Image (spheres, rainbow, N blue to C red):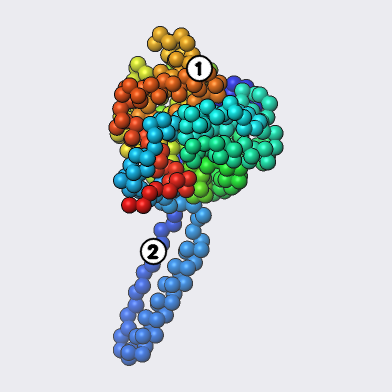
Amino acid sequence: MREPDWMGHQGARPSVSPARQPRRVSWIIAGGVFGVGLVGLLVVVARNIILATVATVVVVTAAPAFSPTVAGSTSTPLPTQAIDAYISHLSEQQQIGQLLMLSVYTNVYSSALDGPLQQAQVGSVIFFPNHNGGPLMPTTLSGLKQLISALQAHATSPLLVATDEEGGDVDRLAPYYGPSPAPSALTETGNPQNAYNQAKLDAQHLHEVGINLDFAPLADVYQEGAIDPSRMFGTTTGQVISYAGAFLDGLQQNGIAGTLKHWPGIGAVPANPDFALPTLNHTQAQLNDTDFATFRALLSHQPDLIMVTHVIVPAYDQKNLASLSPELIDGVLRGQLGYQGVVVTDAMEARSVTEFMQQQGYTDPAQAIGEASVRAILAGEDLIECPVDPALAQGVITAVTQAVVSGRISQERLRQSLRRIISLKVRLGLLTLPQS
């Protein structure tokens, strides 16, 4: 849950909710023809057919621009055999690299990026324009386009390129396109279509600069917690489902991968995981009725990714952060809710991670974050959001590589994540599967 870069220590990432249900159309054709000749019967039938056709046309043209029943970019299952054939042609380091997302905060491409992109062969990057309140980089829209183009050109495989374009306080494109409304402001309009329209506009801007993945919208329900309420779509599950769902559709129906966050829910957390180690003391009933409910409902929109954040949820796992918990990821999110798409970590340099790992005996930050990243994969996550700090990022790369080489992360576990990530890249048009 990355904070707004220019706002200091405030907020978390917002969430989404389902769109409005499409209108149902019904018609009744009734009539009786008594004592009328064959010609009369034909006239009546022809008239009814024409009227029904006209009614259908009117309904279609009046239909809303978005619909929760319209599948996102994940609607067509890809053949596992073809995906496995592609994976088999990747080197071991390329396979490992697909599970790693490099954080990029720089004005222009430099040789410092060659190591992670060409040696570690990371398969994804996330862009930050002014990390931790630092200066804007790149300073111009053309510079941003050049940077992302250079990242793709130097990578050994097509990159997922992500950013946090939520609107409001977390608005990475604001320096280049102007500010976008906060999620709460979209809900205040009273019309989910406005959330869809904003996401569609965001998708156009993201596509223009070369970004193909948005870490938005929030599926969190605001419940008087520590996170800025403007980042969330409402205080009820119904509001979040409607407006977050519309926003998610607006992204995914316009070529940008969307992300529901922050599983298992941060609307009630007493502190921001970026700066503290919070515990969410909800019962299983409370979690299922509110915190999990929005994620469960929004699965019908087929979200490309779900992000897991770093909070302790004792009702399900007293020993682990949610991001390191097999119970909450493989057990609840995948097993009970049935989500089989890509699961991505929240920022791994969060204070909640380092503090938790210190309690586990890890005093060196690079080793702590590296070990946490391995545990996240073992818990069921597919994509690790590496720290911005190069030394910490290298700690993640080293730890995950060693875990795969040693067999701690099994080949089967590695392949599970690779199938999900490669499937996403194919759906986004980044890769073409070999022909059988």
Left or right, 109 with respect to 433, comes to: right
Q: Are marks 1 and 2 in contact (CB under 8 Å)?
A: no
- Of the numbered discs 1 and 2, the one sitting upstream in the chain is 2
| Mark carried by residue 26 | 2
Residue 3 percent across, percent down from the top left: 57, 26
Label 1: which secondary element:
helix
Residue 283 percent across, percent down from the top left: 35, 23
Is residue 393 depicted above or below 230 in this figure? above
Under mark 1, the amino acid is Arg
Identity of the residue furthest to the right in this view? 140
Label 2: which secondary element:
loop
Viewer-nearest residue: 399 or 352: 399
Q: Is residue 90 visible?
A: yes
Tell me what residue is drawn at x 30 percent, y 27 percent.
Answer: 410
Residue 364 percent across, percent down from the top left: 47, 11
Q: Is residue 13 visible?
A: no
Q: CA distance from mark 1 to mark 2?
A: 56 Å
Tell me what residue is drawn at x 63 percent, y 41 percent.
Answer: 145
Viewer-nearest residue: 123 or 293: 123
Q: How many residues crowd around disc 1 within 10 Å: few (fewer than 14), some, or many (20 or more)? A: some
| Mark carried by residue 351 | 1
Left or right, 86 with respect to 271, comes to: left
Tell me what residue is drawn at x 45 percent, y 46 percent.
Answer: 431
Left or right, 88 with respect to 215, comes to: left
